[in-house]
Image: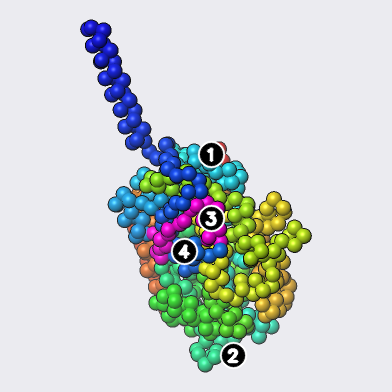
Amino acid sequence: MKPLNKLFSFLVFAVLMTVMVACKDSSEDASTKPKQTSDEGTPITFTVFDSDANNDWENMESPIGKKITEDTGVTLDPEFDIDGGQTKIPLMVASGEYPDLITSKGASQLVEAGALIDLAPLIEEHAPNIKKMLGDEIDRLKWSKEDPSIYVLPNTAIDHQPMTPGFAALVQHDVVRELGYPEMKTLEDLENALREYYKRHPEIDGQPTIPLTLQTDGWRFQASTLNSGFMFTGASDDGEYYIDPETYEATLHYRRPEEKEVFKWYNHMNAEGLLDPESFVQKEDQWLAKMSSGRVLATIAPDYMIYDAQNALRDAGKLERMYGFYPITLSEEFKHHAYQSNGFQVGWGIGITVDCEDPVRAIKFLDYLVSEETQIMLNWGIEGVHHEVVDGKRVIPEEEWEKRRNDKDYLKKTGIGYNFQRFAPRYGDGALDSTGQTFTVNTRELAIEGLTDVEKEVLKNYGVELWKDLYPSADDFPVKPWGAAYNLAIPAGSKLEVANQRMLDITFKRIPEAILADPNEFDDVWKKYMDDLDKAGVEEAEEEFSKIVKDTVELWSE
């Protein structure tokens, strides 16, 4: 070959190799080659899909929303969902089109579809505040033993020591006050109090008294009534499975003999006429309307479900009809685990999608949200507007406290609270900033100050200052090495996922049947329930989920 031909051939080969490399680079997964298209501070809008509803979203027009845009150049364009993304996320996967950011309640489907990028290199290079906040807990974000990528940044609290118990038997203050503050530790105690007060007061404000109602609308049935099986029998919420703390073996929690006794108690309450007959047909708004009316003596629920009713009763001046939080258990042999720590909860949270044109700006925005200055602002508001600094200490003026307590639109008007904290990790109640002050306003002192006079009277008669004082503390339990089992990733479309849904459908059918059955038929209905679970493959599902739990503990221990 002549030298000129050789040179020409070499040049052609070089050009082809360059094109091939360029094509390879352009086709690489976004997780390995992040794109950046805008300078920091340049206005940019990120679309966000949020799997939770949010009635307080303020369109970034509140003082804090405007300050965030001013600081970062970022505006959020969110879509909020009411069914946890169960319908819309599969539609996204089917279409292959995604918003810039997605918050999900379990990201397996998104990960397996290749919808999310690996955040690990972005966090390492561009997110010092996230690294500082998470510390060693960042290892919990690894997806699996086979894939150590980080696809989801949890939107849970760090070092959280909540002032309000997360789960309780919620009982009207007037019930215990009129009955002379009886012991409220067991289901028998609760039943006796409700029966006696109902006997004395068959009507409240001209309406029939309801001794006990249950929240059963959709997923709320799981989070309240079904989870009481855990809480009343010395376990904490791990979704649908009870995890043995010694062996890490998983058991569908309804199959525990002690939980059968809990649901048998509900059956007994129904037979006694103490359970709301509409419990299994009412919707969320109907349940909330009853709770807000003051004629319901008790319910079983997590704390967040009761907030609107508590505020409505407070606004109506029905302070004696508001609810206290009691650590009721099946019997005194059990300890209530509401305060057992999961450690840093992972699995649910926010991810950056492959369709995001500027993942670097996105991670920098999330890093801004978790910075100390922003975390203080999201909890306390803007200095000089929502709080003041006196002798180096943050102080909320009494006039502002009144707005916080009594204006139901306060969060929407100000931007304070969960509006923006839902998009990134956050410091929890009790966590301290660099000055030794708490990041949140939910200090013990302020929690006590925020109680009504009726609450203070009730708590004093039980010998405590806050409802949390009635509960075993976090120090009484080990931190769960598997975190919260409901957050653990289950492969989308797997036999386990299908079996879990089948067993949940069975549970939604059989437990109401068991509760509403004639007491003489309860055991027969329960046996049918257990048989149905066997046919649905419960033992194989337990074995599969046990492996996921054990693998997670091993991964996080490395």
**Above or below 38: residue 105:** below
Front-most of residues 57 and 151: 57
The answer to which of marks 3 and 4 sits earlier in the sequence is: 4
Q: Which residue is mark 1?
A: 124
Q: Where residue 200 is drawn, which disc sits there?
A: 2
Q: Where residue 70 is drawn, which disc sits there?
A: 3
Quadrant, the N terminus: top left
Q: Is residue 162 magenta?
A: no
Q: Where residue 195 is drawn, which disc sits there?
A: none
**Mark 1, secondary structure of its residue:** helix
**Above or below 88: residue 96:** above
Left or right of 160, for residue 15: left
Front-most of residues 234 and 434: 434
Give me the residue at 42% from left, 36% from top.
Answer: 32
Q: Amino acid type of disc 1?
A: Glu
**Closer to the observer: label 2 or label 3?**
3
Q: Is residue 73 magenta?
A: yes
Look at the image and give the residue range highlighted in magenta.
Answer: 64-85
